Image: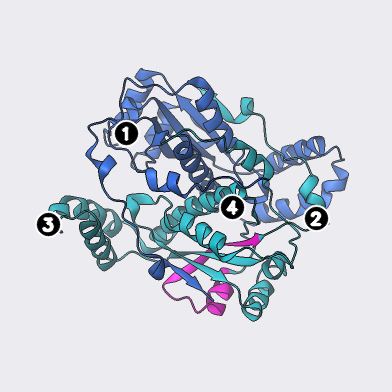
Chain colours: A cyan, B blue
Amino acid sequence: MTATPSIIPALEWRYATKQFDPAKKIPDAEVHELTESLRLSASSFGLQPWKFIVVRDPALRAKIKEHAWNQSQVTDASHLIVLAARKDIHDDYIRKFVTATAKARNTTIEALKGYEDIMLGTVRNMPPEAITAWNQRQVYIALGTLLLTAAQKGIDACPMEGFDPKKVDEVLGMTDYTVTALCPIGYRASTDKYAGAAKVRFPASEIVEYC
Amino acid sequence: MTATPSIIPALEWRYATKQFDPAKKIPDAEVHELTESLRLSASSFGLQPWKFIVVRDPALRAKIKEHAWNQSQVTDASHLIVLAARKDIHDDYIRKFVTATAKARNTTIEALKGYEDIMLGTVRNMPPEAITAWNQRQVYIALGTLLLTAAQKGIDACPMEGFDPKKVDEVLGMTDYTVTALCPIGYRASTDKYAGAAKVRFPASEIVEYC
């Protein structure tokens, strides 16, 4: 890995965009790079308990907006990325993952038995609602990955938790997954007054400790 | 924001490092850049409900390791980053944040009253355990930011959920915060057989949908 320029400036540059320019569209190749950043994100055991939906359809986005406090970013941004978590992890999902691992690493399912048993032991000991919560936390890793990847590319985003998950699940026909975060992506409007507002972060002296 | 090289290669390069080279230390300036990436991470309402502890002390790390399935990364990595979430968000925390916002943006607390009321309304309607869970999800955004920032700099990491939070809270003397993830950072050992293992990710056709 060669050293690359700092990505701190990208983090300084990004902000939760309030007004997107509806006329500016992200090129398909860049949208693909963003979805790849989601797909490649880290997750517990590497289980990837998620699904990502890129919503372009204006009618669908208008319906989602109704259940997202009518926030204009949902319809005005170039694309709407929906981040959803699996509701549960059954044995068959773990086995599917182990099979994929064996294939990718040119080994056998038997050789991965110890690993499989640890994962099975973990999920069998968790109540269903704890599994959903666990999966949702993983989705937030992917959200962090997406926000930084977008910022690094000069693409604006507005991560959102302000929506009715049950309603948005319904609109998208979700049954095995539940919508965990919405992230409109695109380009800030020149009129967004928040674009120039100073970022508010507590000083390192308050939130970073060394010991 | 000028276009920068893709960070997908960094995501391809990273993996949950199993064996760190205990002799290789991350320079202080780079550790600082990693903690800055945490500090600058996005969070709901920008509330930053977190604390990050960089643990260098070998004795402390040995104690944490005891409560983290004895995973050698905790003591062998160059540094151990502990990511902790606030257990609760009281009115006074929101007011502190509003005060910081007014100061950073050169405005008055009164001008931010609407924003403050939305935040107060949100947290007053949440049971305490839901607030902790919400804060922990935000910490996972910071974790995603950290992992990508580290990878981009050629620094290895191993995000971990496998530890006893109550015990690690005790070891670190945490009361208002709870340890949510551990992340040893450093450089992979040449003997780590997982360094060369193919990354296992489900194909985009299974986890990315367009509509």
Q: Image quarter for residue B154?
A: top left
Is residue B173 something one can see in this rendering? no
- The image's mark for residue A110 is 3
Q: CA distance from mark 1 to mark 4?
A: 37 Å
Q: x%, y% of residue A209?
A: 54, 25
Element carrying mark 3: helix
Tell me the element at label 4: helix
Q: Which residue is mark 1?
A: B67
Between B200 and A175, the residue placed more toward the observer is: B200
Do marks 3 and 1 share a chain? no
> How many C-alpha atoms fall within 10 Å of the one at disc 1: few (<14), some, or many (≥20)?
some
Which numbered dot is residue A192?
2
Give the residue drawn at x 62%, y 28%.
Answer: A204
- Residue A92 position, x and y percent, is 25, 68
**What residue is shown with label 4?**
A150
Callout 4 and callout 3 share a chain: yes
Badge 2 or badge 4: first in the primary sequence:
4
Please check the rendered image and state whether residue A168 is part of the magenta-colored stretch, yes or no. Answer: yes
Highlighted magenta segment, given as a residue range: A165-185
A5, A112: nearer the viewer: A5
Q: Chain of mark 3?
A: A
Q: Dot 4, how many residues are within 10 Å of its Cα: few (below 14), some (14-19), or many (20+)?
A: many
User: Could you tell me how far apart the alpha carbons at marks 4 and 3 are, in whole angstroms?
Assistant: 40 Å
Q: Amino acid at mark 4?
A: Ala
* Sequence-wise first label, 3 or 2: 3
